[in-house]
Amino acid sequence: MNDRPSLDLSGLVKAYDVRGTVPDQLDEDLARLFGAAFVETTGADAIVIGHDMRPSSPGLARAFADGAAERGADVTEIGLCSTDGLYFASGKLQRPGAMFTASHNPARYNGIKMCRAGATPVGQDTGLREIRAFVERWSTGRALPATSRAPGALTQRDMLGDYAAHLLGLVDLAAIRPLKIVVDAGNGMGGLTTPAVFRDLSVEVVPMYFELDGTFPNHEANPLDPKNIVDLQHKVRETKADLGLAFDGDADRCFVVDERGEAVSPSTVTALIAARLLADHPGSTVIHNLITSRAVPDVVREHGGIPVRTRVGHSFIKAEMARTDAVFGGEHSAHYYFRDFWFADSGMLAALHVIAALGGQQGPLSALVGQYGRYAASGEINSVVPDQQRTLAKVRDTFAGRDGAVADELDGLTISATGWWFNLRPSNTEPLLRLNVEASDADTMTRLRDEVLAIVRT
């Protein structure tokens, strides 16, 4: 590299990962520097690297590996994997890890999710800031500082079978009744992991878009957007399946559709899994973020557990899980975290719990989950506002005098009262406020939603 001004990586290095467009924001030269900086920051003697199916992923992953090896770390390359497959490898091998993926983002994006040994996340406060500083300094063209360590070795290892065996060892599926399951992999990594995990189960899999294709020719691999599960809903009804599953691009999130083709909210899935795990681990803590349904803490208490509420964001929920030794954690975005999986998130493990619950009784999924979906919710509604803090203050002042209303600011503004609550929180990257409303009935939710939106958008 020629000597040049230091790069500004503020658009590439996010709160929890590295993510941007290829090659203008992220290329193989930068990936090599990130690999070297990762080893410099963690002090690792050995690391593990995986990647998804995006066309740019193999080259970026190998460049990262080269940079890490130059700093003296032995590198195990596990190749194509889901993000939770990389977390498994980090936990099983007890090595820091890096996963090349941009999750559900469009094909032109790629990125790096990094963790320390045991799948402990790397975010701004846990190493990512230092990694960025190294890369920005080294990008001027100055040579990397000398190291006394000999270059590390690069080896390849297939861990897909070990990953599948580990997950199947965590959920008892031996006695489930035969089920028909439609799985939409969205041309993402679920197309690799689903056959490996489901191969010996008493289930018939109807595959959709299992071909690994990082250009996403059928639909975006983002099941959180309702338009991306329309094909799955239709196929479930057409085939008279018992349920449908949709994975995002890197398959760390799983979305569920019942036998009618109706989406099951991630909060409902969280409550269902919490009830199952509390039966085996009575008195345990379960983490939920502040915009999951209030049904989640209700169910946790009913099953003898201790609910703990956190801010939105996986770094917060993972930290709180580790602090409290929580057995499980769930988010509204369909991230599900398990103590038996190094406190990391796994969409596939969540799917296995849903299958075990459904297959262990005779009723349809809609009836099974009905006991966990107790309130009317708005879903997340975004509004563009010129001044986030001024708007939040206006909403706070409007509701301050309401009988029984209580405000807290753990994450944005939450106002709670008997029978309803709402949260209004600012986006960290855009001039948006995100509103979530929940109430005991649909009419109350609608009135409250419309009242808050009228204030926000005036």
Image (cartoon, helix red, strand yellow):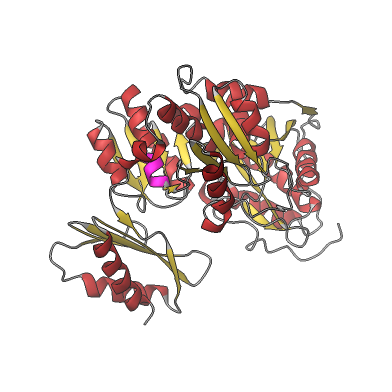
Residue 181, located in which quarter of the rendered image? top right
**In the rendered view, would you say 15 is above or below 361?**
below
Residue 254 on image: x %, y %:
52, 42
**What span is in magenta?**
266-270
Could you tell me if residue 225 is visible in this image?
Answer: no
Q: Residue at x 65, y 59 (%)?
A: 12
Q: Residue furthest left?
A: 403
Give the overall secondary structure of the magenta segment.
helix
- Foreground residue among 356 and 458: 356
Front-most of residues 139 and 263: 263
Q: Is residue 315 above or below residue 174?
A: below
Q: Position of residue 161 (x, y in %)?
A: 66, 23
Image quadrant holding the C terminus, namely bottom left
The reply, left or right, for residue 22 in relation to residue 446 is right
Name the outermost residue toward the top: 174
Residue plotted at (71% across, 48% down): 34
The verdict on residue 247 being magenta is: no
Question: Splitting the image into 4 quarters, where does residue 364 fall?
Answer: top left
Q: Position of residue 171 (x, y in %)?
A: 47, 23
- With 449 as the anchor, is 80 left or right in this view? right
Q: Position of residue 138 (x, y in %)?
A: 75, 54
